[in-house]
Amino acid sequence: MSVRIENGLALVDGRWSEEPLALRGALLADDATSGAPARVIDASGLLVLPGIVDIHGDAFERYIMPRPGVRFDTTLALRDTDRQLVANGITTAFHGVTISWEPGLRSVEAARAFVATLMDIRPGLACDTRLHLRWETFALEALEEVRGWLALDPAPILAFNDHTTGSVLKGTIARKIGQMAERSGLTQDDYRALLDRVWGGARGRARRHCEPRGQRAGERQCVAGP
């Protein structure tokens, strides 16, 4: 569909312009004056700006769980998030879904349901909504599912997270224990006990071994292994 935007102040290629803009499908057209557009938008008194690309956002979690113990349907939450995104000029968004060893909002099970729902309703969303997978490095059981999600179209972006180490070692993340426990549905004591089990189990599975490398006598390479 062709659209012409008139009478606005548009930011085009880093410069302000009062010239009309023409769209052909999803792209800007070179000539805004040729042909009769299917739709004309009067942008008098308005700024016409490029859409914002948000490469990481987890505000959708507040729509799913506005407060501890209160959960909304994921489809409803994503549609509400979609309206907020486009209302604030965001036209491409990567939802940062966490894949963690925690139960509750950021569990592997919750991530599985979230990804399935998003991919199902994505064609009907106004914002070009994509995935930013935030994989907790101690959630080792999620490996195969993460591999599968990386093959989705459009392809997600991937980040490795480690809130576990910082929490256990009383780093800057330790102050968030209360918040992390709330979203998991556990008491702080139960959450700390789970954190200790995850930390201890992962460290127990880790080992280091040395393998020969090169021809020089005594030269060794240490390799971290599972």
Image: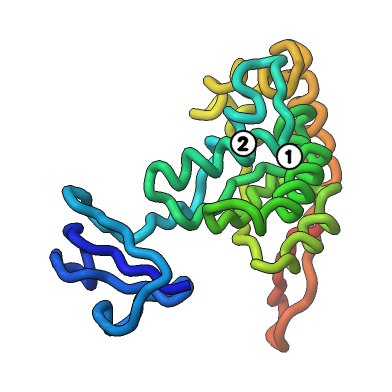
Q: Which one is in front in this view, the residue at disc 1 or the one at disc 2?
A: 1
Report which quarter residue 155 is drawn in: bottom right
Taking the spot 64% from the left edge, 34% from the top edge, the residue there is 77
Taking the spot 63% from the left edge, 54% from the top edge, the residue there is 131
- From this view, report whether residue 41 is shown above or below residue 89: below
- From this view, report whether residue 106 is shown above or below residue 23: above
Instruction: Characterize the local packing of mark 1: few (<14), some (14-19) or many (20 or more) Cα atoms within 10 angstroms.
Output: many
Taking the spot 48% from the left edge, 54% from the top edge, the residue there is 55
Compared across the picture, whether 27 is left or right of 116 comes to: left
Q: Residue flagged by tag 1: what amino acid is it?
A: Ser
Cβ atoms under marks 1 and 2 closer than 8 Å? yes
What residue did someone put label 2 on? 163
Which element type, helix, strand or loop, lies under badge 2? helix
Q: Nearer the viewer, residue 209 or 181?
A: 181
Compared across the picture, whether 159 is left or right of 85 comes to: right
Question: Mark 1 or 2 closer to N-term?
Answer: 1
Which residue is outermost to the front? Answer: 36
Residue 109 x %, y %: 83, 39
Which element type, helix, strand or loop, lies under badge 1? loop
Compared across the picture, whether 54 is left or right of 75 comes to: left
Q: Which of 145 and 38 is in front in this view?
A: 38
Q: In which quarter of the image is the C terminus?
A: bottom right
What residue did someone put label 1 on? 100
Q: Which of 201 and 184 is in front in this view?
A: 184
Residue 138, visible in the rendered structure: no
- From this view, report whether residue 205 is shown above or below residue 92: above
Q: Residue flagged by tag 2: what amino acid is it?
A: His
Taking the spot 66% from the left edge, 55% from the top edge, the residue there is 122
Compared across the picture, whether 114 is left or right of 201 comes to: left
